[in-house]
Image: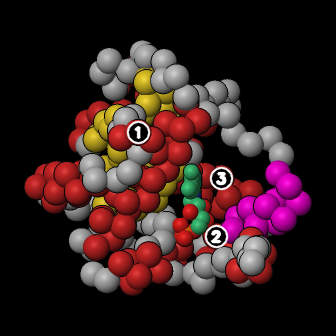
Amino acid sequence: MDIRQAIKERRSIRKFKPEQIPEGMLGEILDEARWSPSWGNTQPWEFYVVTGEPLKKIKAANCRKLEEGGQSLPDIKMPASWPEQLKKRYNAVGRTTLDALGLQREDKAGRQEHTRSMFRLFDAPCLIVVCVDKNSSSVEYALLDVGIITQTLCLLAHDRGLGTIIMASAVNFPVSLKEVLPDAENKLIAVGIALGYPDMEAPINNFVRERASLNEFVKLVK
Ligand SMILES: Cc1cc2nc3c(=O)[nH]c(=O)nc-3n(C[C@H](O)[C@H](O)[C@H](O)COP(=O)(O)O)c2cc1C
């Protein structure tokens, strides 16, 4: 697939088909994603590729926490506030998502079901948990590198007809995750990438996405 096509077509998938991803395909994607750049070629990312029973446990633990109103304590703090423009965009994507699901703002039960489905990782058959070592001397640069490889991986997956969604909510409860992931005590859990075959019939995977125009974020200095 042409790189430009992949960048423009990739979108966050919020409804997956149940089919598993062939292991060989996942292996190829990871093998190619290794070529992402990183600070001083440190390659600080560490991936847990979770499927099957362990993934079921993670989804169940997430939903249990949600039901219990368990405190979300992600290793990377959720933003508490935004500059006005960013807040507008954040609210807009939330509204568009609910519209695509045909949910009214006052439909509390419908919104709760959407939140539950998010904590079930939109039923994706695979979750990649992306971590860095807690003792990285510059967590900021390590996280920048994580962002780079995450996008590379999503594009490589898209090229193979897979869908992905990068998910902060997948790593809201690191304590539960660490009960399933081996040797994770010293890891900083950065983000999750849910992946699988996308259900492209679903309206939630079809709404029109927005982006800021260039003049909102580019200053030409000549
Ligand atoms: C770091 C990060 C965390 C995200 N977490 C979530 C999430 O928890 N739930 C969700 O539905 N979407 C999540 N998203 C997806 C964004 O909402 C999405 O990328 C954005 O709205 C742009 O849409 P697009 O990916 O379809 O182009 C996340 C994206 C990023 C980059």
Residue type, mark 2 in image: Thr
**Mark 2 residue's CB less than 8 Å from ligand 1:** yes
Q: Mark 1 or mark 3: which is in front?
A: 1
Q: Which mark is residue 112?
A: 3
Q: Quadrant of residue 156?
A: bottom left
Q: Quadrant of the N terminus?
A: bottom left
C-alpha span from label 1 to label 2: 39 Å
Q: Which residues are magenta?
A: 82-94
Q: Is residue 89 above or below residue 36?
A: below
Residue at point 45%, 67% (across, down) = 13
The magenta stretch spans residue 54: no
Magenta-drawn stretch, dominant element (helix, strand or loop): helix
When asked about the image quadrant of residue 96, the answer is bottom right
Earlier residue among tags 1 and 3: 1
Disc 3, SS: helix
In primary-sequence order, the first of circles 1 and 2 is 1
Asked whether 90 falls inside the magenta stretch, the response is yes
> Dividing the picture into quarters, in which one does residue 213 lie?
bottom right
